[in-house]
Amino acid sequence: MVQMHEIGVQLSLEHKKNIIKANYYKKEITINIIDDCIRGSDILIVSSFVNRRYEKCRRRNKGVDITLSKNYITKQYIDVYMNDVDEQLNHTNPNWLSDLLELPNPEDQII
């Protein structure tokens, strides 16, 4: 069995949106964490292999590409990311989620 680890990084708004989209479409995603964001309060669940690469880069203050398996993008973290994105985007675009997921807008539906 693969051992999983939680790592703390600083995710941008775009990272969070891409993780939400990957979760919706049940796809794996690779995100680039730049050196300034290698430490933070946003939690990702990663395999031991990814954790070793992350720790090595964190010690060197270097950025790292992190691949998140579709199986490890959990609902708990998606809810947190959705709240963060919603707080930032809801004022400018209340339909941000359907736009992100490329879903038809219910207001545009002809009845």
Image (cartoon, helix red, strand yellow):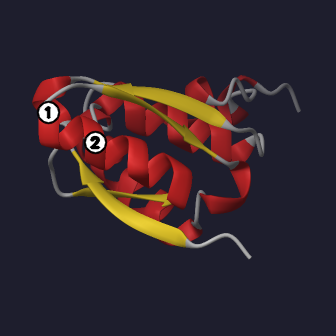
Residue designated by label 2: 56
Per the image, label 2 sits on a secondary structure element best described as: helix
Q: Which of 48 and 7 lies nearest the eye of the viewer? A: 48
Q: Position of residue 10 (x, y in %)?
A: 21, 42
Query: Where is mark 1, residue-wise?
Result: 60
20 sits left or right of 12 in the view: right
| SS category of the residue bearing label 1 | helix
Disc 2 residue type (three-letter): Lys
* Residue 94 can be seen in this image: no
Above or below residue 38? Residue 7 is below
Mark 1, other Cα within 10 Å: few <14 / some 14–19 / many ≥20: few
Which label belongs to residue 27?
none
Task: Please tell me how crowded label 2 is: few (under 14), some (14-19), or many (20+) other residues with Cα within 10 Å.
Answer: few
Q: Is residue 14 visible?
A: yes
Specify whether 89 is left or right of 100. left
Labelled pair 2, 1 in contact (Cβ < 8 Å): yes
- The structure residue drawn at horizontal position 48% and vertical position 61%, both measured from the top left corner, is 45
- Residue at horizontal 42%, vertical 53%? 51
> How far across and how far down the image is residue 105, in percent?
68, 28
